[in-house]
Amino acid sequence: MFPRPHDHPVGGLTMADGTTTIDRLTPVTKRIDRAAIRLYAELTDDFNPIHVDPDFAATTPMKGIIAHGLLSVNLLWQSVRRSLGEAAVSGATLDIRFLRPVREDDVVTAGGQRRTDGDGYDVWIDNQHGETVIAGRILHRPGTVAS
């Protein structure tokens, strides 16, 4: 396995205008257990049986319960907030693809790396097997990065 940018510590550069450019977003990790899935279903009123009914979910092509996609996406927002501050979150645009389902009891980690073109961050969520389950990019307004 090749090293990924998020395998290294967070770094930053202070710009002439006083803002900070962060090279890597702070990783955020969570175990997506049945309790977390159930709480998210209650919060969003999304009781699709693929998320909450193990007997039903076992009969589907997923072969078991999968988490709500946005449950995991929340980890990306937490990573951005911890790294860049609240203003960066409120001014951000997220463009992602769901690549694999997040299964019950997966441990997922969200992170990101500043794009080489300087236009936001490439972001991802990986599971405990090192598989990327969500990938894309986050763009934020200039001047919204926490210093």
Image: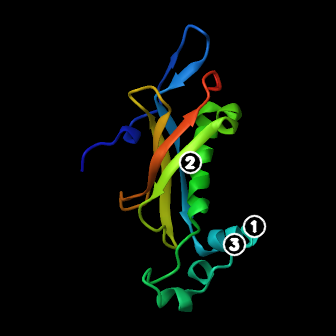
Measure the alpha-carbon separation of dots 2 and 3: 19 Å
Structural distance between the alpha carbons of marks 1 and 3: 6 Å
Residue 68 image point, x, y percent: 59, 68
| The one of 129 and 115 positioned closer to us in this rendering | 115
Query: Taking 25 as reference, is 40 left or right?
Result: right
Q: Which residue is mark 2?
A: 76
Q: Tell me the residue that label 1 is attached to.
A: 43
Q: Is residue 37 visible?
A: yes
The kind of residue on which mark 2 rests is Leu
Image position of 49 with respect to 74: above or below:
below
Q: Disc 1 or 2, which lies upstream in sequence?
A: 1
Could you tell me which quadrant the C terminus lies in?
top right
Q: Distance from label 1 to label 2 (Cα)?
A: 19 Å
Q: Label 3 sits on what residue type? A: Ala
Instruction: State the colouring used for the structure image.
Output: rainbow
Q: Position of residue 2 (x, y in %)?
A: 25, 45
Q: Amino acid at mark 1?
A: Leu
Instruction: Look at the image and tell me whether residue 125 can be seen.
Output: no
In the rendered image, residue 39, in percent from the top left (x then y), is placed at 71, 70
Compared to residue 82, the image places residue 37 above or below, namely below
Identify the residue at horizontal 41%, vertical 41% (top origin): 6
Q: Residue at label 3?
A: 41
Q: Which mark is residue 100?
A: none
Q: Is residue 15 above or below residue 7?
A: above
Q: Quadrant of residue 99?
A: bottom left
Residues marked 1 and 3 touching at CB (< 8 Å): yes
Q: How would you rate the neighbour count of disc 3 (Cα within 10 Å): few for under 14, some for 14-19, many for 20 or more?
A: some
